[in-house]
Amino acid sequence: VPIDGYGVGTAIGAASDAPALELAYKLTVYAGEPRMKSSSGKASWPGAKQVFRESDSDGNHVGDVIAGIDEEFPGTPLLRPVMQKGRLLMDAIGSMEDQENWAWEQILALPELQRTLEQAPAYPVTISDYLKKLQADTLARIQPERPD
């Protein structure tokens, strides 16, 4: 099931002196239909997605595009399945050393300003027009008409 975010915390439905696990996720597709959270200030992007990272000719990252799963954009697609039918796809993740090396490569390819501890301009992330329309359409479908 496609999900957008996954957060981990503590103390969900458990006494403070007992072991606990708190987590949340954003369901984005269910039974083939786009889903989204519509709370004010917490709206999510519905539908399965892909993220494309664009780099310049020197390999430095210049921005990401969050798009629908079937869209195509310049850049490298970042998301890939790591589980299928409840099983971990080992070929998809590689070794821990591979993952660490990939993460460092990605960090070092960010603009220098984004790698400092100082306040920096936001790294450019764009939402595709398709996802914007899908969000508006999904919101219209899930929110009842309000009388004037």
Image: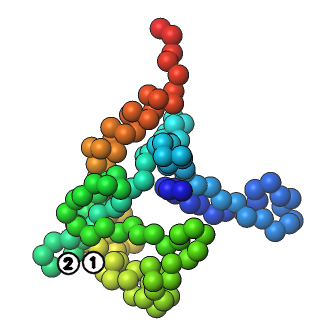
Amino acid type, callout 2? Gly
Instruction: Assess disc 2: are there few (<14), some (14-19) or many (≥20) residues with their C-alpha within 10 Å of its C-alpha.
Output: few
Q: Could you tell me residue 113's position as x and y percent?
A: 28, 70
Amino acid type, callout 1? Ala
Viewer-proximal residue among 12 and 79: 79
The disc label shown at residue 59, or none: 2
Label 2: state its secondary structure.
Answer: loop
Question: What residue is rendered at 20% in x and 78% in y?
Answer: 59
Q: Quadrant of the N terminus?
A: bottom right
Please tell me which of labels 1 and 2 falls first in the chain: 2
Label 1: state its secondary structure.
Answer: loop
Exactly how many numbered labels are in the figure? 2
The disc label shown at residue 109, or none: 1
Instruction: Place residue 133 in its image quadrant.
Output: top left
Left or right of 18, for residue 28: left
Q: Are marks 1 and 2 in contact (CB under 8 Å)?
A: yes
Left or right of 83, for residue 63: left
Q: Is residue 65 above or below residue 138?
A: below
Left or right of 32, for residue 119: left
Q: Is residue 118 visible?
A: no
Question: What residue is rendered at 33% in x and 83% in y?
Answer: 105
Q: Could you tell me residue 128's position as x and y percent?
A: 28, 48
Instruction: Place residue 52 in its image quadrant.
Output: bottom left
Instruction: Assess disc 1: are there few (<14), some (14-19) or many (≥20) residues with their C-alpha within 10 Å of its C-alpha.
Output: some
Instruction: Place residue 24 in its image quadrant.
Output: bottom right
Q: Is residue 44 above or below residue 56?
A: above
Question: What residue is rendered at 56% in x and 77% in y?
Answer: 88
Q: How far apart are the two marked residues, 1 and 2, measured between alpha carbons? A: 7 Å
Question: What residue is rendered at 49% in x and 18% in y?
Answer: 145
Q: Is residue 130 visible?
A: yes
The disc label shown at residue 100, or none: none
Q: Could you tell me residue 137's position as x and y percent?
A: 39, 33
